[in-house]
Every structure is written in C-alpha cells, then in structure tokens.
Amino acid sequence: MKSYTKLFYIILIFTVSCTKQLDLPPENILIESQVVGSANTAEALLASSYFKTYAAIRNYYYMSADVATGISSTLPTNGFISLWNGTLVPTSGTIQTLWNNHYSAINEANVIINLIPNSTFSQAIKTRLIAEAKFVRALNYFILVRDFGQGALSGNLSGDGVPLQLLNYANYDPSKNLARSTSLQVYTQILKDLDEAAADLTDLTTATPQVFRGRAQKTTCFALASRVALYMRDYPKAINYSAQALLNTTQYVLASSPALVFPATTATSNLALSSELIFAFPVSYNSDINDNNLTGYFAKTAIWPTPAFLATYAPNDIRNSALMMVVGNTAGPTTLFCPSKFANPVGRDHLPIIRVSEIYLNRAEALVRSTNAINTEAIGLLNAIRQRSFPTGLKPAPFTAASFATANDLINAIMRERKWELAFEGHDMFDMIRTGVAPNAALSNPTKWVYPIPRREIDLTNGLITQNPGY
C-alpha cells in the first residue's frame, strides 16, 4: 500500500482533474470506467474521496460543534457563525458548499463501488478498495444526515433525512432525481456499508502509522458504527459495535495519559500519530504546505477555548494543565490558551475523527441507557478515562456503584466526561442535541438543530427534495 504521503501527492494531481473527469467525458479525458480500470488510477480516485471528505470537514466540523456550546469562542465576524447562531438560510453559500463537498466525496466512492467489480486487476485489491469506499460513503452520509436529517439526532427517525444516492453520477437527468430518504433509511444504509466494509477489511499489521490510522481498517468501521448506533439510540447495537471496536488491543490502545495523545510540539510536519487514534486525517504528512487547518486555535485571534469552559475541569486534570493547554502564538492574546490538539505553528496538525477514548464512552453510555440501570462495566470504562486524566498521586477516588443514586446520575457523569475528553474535536453540539439539550440560547428552537436544505437542491428537483421545517 502506498504511504499516505504518496497518496496525498496523487490526490493533489488527481483532484485537479477528477471533477472534470467525472462530469463529462471529452475524447481526450479519461471516463469513469477508465479511471477504475487500473489499480493505480482506482487508488488515486479513492485517495481523492478521502481528501474531499477531509476538505469538507476540516473547519466547520470542529468549530460549529464547539463554539455553539460555549466550549470555544470566536469573532462575531467569523464566516461560519451562522452555523451555530440560528441565522442559517437556505440560500447560504456555506450550506451549499457543505452539501456539495460531501456528495462529491460520495460520488467518487460510488464510482469505485459500482464500477470496480468489472475491472480486471487483482480481486484482493478490488475488494479492499470497494470496502474503503463504503467506509468513505458511510462517513459522509453520517455527517449529512446528522446535519440535515429531521429527527436524526432527536430520535424521530421517520423524519426526512437526505437523498440516498448509491449510484455514481453520469450526467444530469431529471428523471433520476431522488427525494429525501428517511433518517432511518440513511442510518440503515450507513450501517450496511460499515458492516460490509468491516467484513472485507483487516487491521494492517505492517504499515507506517499515517497509513494505518488514516485509512479505513476493520476496527475503523466498527468504531464509526458504534457512534452511529449511539446517535440512532439503538443501544444494543452500540454495545455490540463498541465491543468489536475494542478487540484489537495491540494496535489501538488507550494511552496512559491524554498528554501522550496530543503532545505539545513545535514541529511543523510529519507529526507522530498516537496509537489511541483509530481514524484521523494525517495532515502534517500532506505535501501541500498551504493546506493548513484550524490555525485559528493556535493564533487565538479567530477561535479559542473559553476561560469559562476551562474552569469546569477539576484541579490537576491534565486536559486543562500546562501539558494540554499551551500558549500558542505569542503574538495572540496573552490571556488565552490554545489546545495542543491543534497547536502546530502552521496549523498542520492531524484531525482526529475517532479515538479509543470515545469508544470507551460510547460503550459506557450505551450500557447504561440500554437497561436504565447502574452498570459496573460502564463505571469501569468511565474510571479508565477519568483516572488517566490526573497525574500519579493526584488522582481522584474512583467511582463505584455507590457514587450514583440513579442511572441518570451515571449518565450525567459520562456526558460530562465526554465534554472534557472530546473537547475541540467536534462532538459537543451533537451530544447536546441528541440528549435533548439546546446548544445555546439562539438554538432553543429544535427546528434549528438541523441545517436548511440548500435552496438550489430544491429548485433543481422541482420540489422533490423538500425543505426542513422552520426554513
């Protein structure tokens, strides 16, 4: 398998031309069947779909979820502010771009899934490429239904989700326009893709860390599925998927300290990936030095952790100590800190998507919610995350069953731990919405907990795609 560095070189070359290649097939440009006709070009198309997924989420995915709940603050002039202040409109260019970017990645995955079976190269390579493409498709559909799907986070899965396009786009044909599938139908397809991908993938045993953790593996599929099932409120499935995601204790390991997962660094490239990262975009290996992400956290002039949120951490919690909250750009406000999760001076940190610690918390929450009872395994998982977050000699007393009067008290402790553990990684707004809590005063109306469908999509389909209520 090519290194991720080489894959990014391929991406940069291929992405420039692939959108043209996939729209219309002039005589001097490869058509889709030719793109997947060889292992090398098919690999390049898969790399492009990964890259487009990264490009779609590298800013809004994190900022909207954190600023919306007060974990972070930003300037009132920030271009993404409408994502969390309830002022989004269907004609928003930001919304149209998000929609387009995710469906573009899905389309390239569809090309691989649908056309590679007819290719003549190695069956083993075809099987792997198709499986990875199913993971990419699942990840993009999960973000789409989470952001746009009625009831997708609030438990009413019969609400309209997003159009479920499983065939690759050939040319514009109004007769092939699709209405919105229900949120349940989209979730069902996501889990189907992840199940099938997991069945055909293994966890690599010989690969550089950036390849191993930057592309779908068997464990990657189970880990994402555990989050999907949790969001669906299908707690038995979340328990099952999390168990499978935690089986590989050799290559995916809960670090002994969170400081080892996101160490403060002044390096600008080729940053090591922690064994706790199940899936991440290894940005520091990208050959494009201009492709930075979340530099605002380091500069502290566009986005920064709020002092009020930092004050919620317990004394001596490593996640709020000098090991994790670093000074950042010395030219920025001296009273503010930046999280070492995004402390690279040129913003080329990895983007963490799934970590082992999240799977611990997914499982703990699902175990309690599935029976509405205090669960000793869930307490053990919660303790594992909480205890490692304090230095030796300063650790709090572990929780026991006697620490919680009710199952709801245990759930509240798990949710608090998620907020502290996964801060600045794009979870908090969605964790609040899926538990029925308004992210902020501007989003007190649940109809604003999902984005509006882009007006252009409604117009192009003559209303076949319907708008979300409230827009």
Image: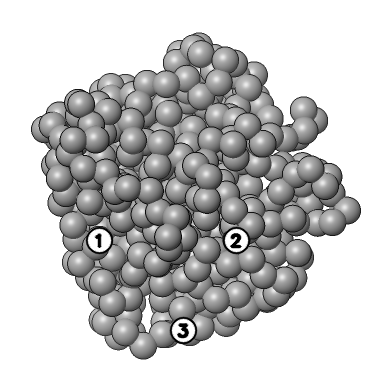
Give residue 134's position: percent from left, percent from top. 33, 59
Q: Alpha-carbon distance for marks 3 and 2?
A: 26 Å
Decide: marks 1, 2 in contact (CB < 8 A)?
no
Q: Which residue lies furthest to the right in this view?
A: 331
For residue 110, what is the image quadrant? bottom left
Write the residue at 47% across / 20% down.
438
Q: Is residue 465 visible?
A: no
Secondary structure type for disc 1: helix
Task: Kindly identify the amino acid type of the residue bearing the numbered disc 1.
Answer: Ala
Give residue 262's position: percent from left, percent from top. 55, 63
Secondary structure type for disc 3: loop
Give residue 259's position: percent from left, percent from top. 52, 63
Q: Name the residue under label 1.
A: 245
Q: Alpha-carbon distance for marks 1 and 3?
A: 21 Å
Secondary structure type for disc 2: loop
Q: Is residue 374 visible?
A: yes
Q: In the image, 358: left or right of 123? A: right
The correct choice, above or below, for 264 with respect to 138 in the image is below
Task: Kindly identify the amino acid type of the residue bearing the numbered disc 3.
Answer: Thr
Q: In the image, 4: left or right of 59? A: left
Nearer to us of marks 1 and 2 is 2
Q: Residue furthest front?
A: 393
Q: Alpha-carbon distance for marks 1 and 2?
A: 28 Å
Q: Crowdedness of circle 2 by 10 Å Cα count: few (<14), some, many (20+)?
A: some
Q: Earlier in the sequence, mark 1 or mark 2?
A: 1
Q: Crowdedness of circle 1 by 10 Å Cα count: few (<14), some, many (20+)?
A: many
Q: Name the residue under label 2.
A: 323
Q: Crowdedness of circle 3 by 10 Å Cα count: few (<14), some, many (20+)?
A: some
Write the residue at 25% across / 61% down.
245
